[in-house]
Image: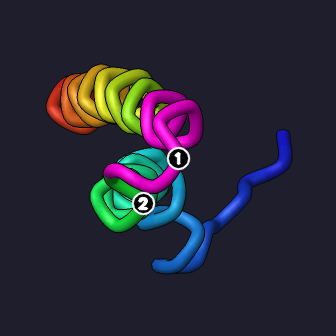
Amino acid sequence: MVSERFSKLDRWRAKYGVLAIALSCLLTAINSWGQNWILTSVLGLGALVCGVLGFFDMKRTNDKEQTS
């Protein structure tokens, strides 16, 4: 068996990467509010989807850490 050790950055990216993308989508949607409604709606939807994925990913990661 190969024992892999991940750096702190890799662990942070695995746990919080999706939430960082959701935050950037949300900030860009707020910044473009009123200029281009199609872009704003796509970015808002992307922030919503990425936020939900990030929440459940963090929940799964925390459950794994508690059981290990």
Q: Is residue 55 visible?
A: yes
> In the displayed structure, does residue 5 sit left or right of residue 57?
right
For badge 2, the amino acid type reads Ser
Q: Position of residue 8 (x, y in %)?
A: 47, 78
Picture layout, residue 45 above or below residue 39: above
Instruction: Kindly identify the residue that appears in the image at 34 percent across and 50 percent down.
Output: 34
Query: Which residue range is magenta in the image?
Result: 34-43
Quarter assignment of residue 12: bottom left
For badge 1, the amino acid type reads Asn
- Tell me the element at label 1: loop
Badge 2, how many Cα within 10 Å: few under 14, some, many 20+?
Answer: some
> In front: 22, or 26?
26
In three-dimensional space, the C-alpha distance between marks 2 and 1, rounded to whole angstroms, equals 7 Å
- Asked whether the residues under the numbered discs 2 and 1 touch, taking CB atoms below 8 Å apart as contact, a structural biologist would say yes
Q: Does the magenta stretch include residue 37?
A: yes
Instruction: Kindly identify the residue that appears in the image at 56 percent across and 31 percent down.
Output: 38
Quarter assignment of residue 64: top left
Picture layout, residue 58 above or below residue 45: below
> In front: 30, or 1?
30
Q: Where is residue 35 in the image (x, y as percent from the top left)?
A: 45, 55
Q: Position of residue 23 (x, y in %)?
A: 33, 57
Badge 1, how many Cα within 10 Å: few under 14, some, many 20+?
Answer: few
Residue under label 2: 32
Instruction: Kindly identify the residue that appears in the image at 28 percent across and 57 percent down.
Output: 30
- Tell me the element at label 2: loop
Q: Where is residue 25 in the image (x, y as percent from the top left)?
A: 44, 52
> In front: 54, or 63?
54
Residue 36 disc label: 1
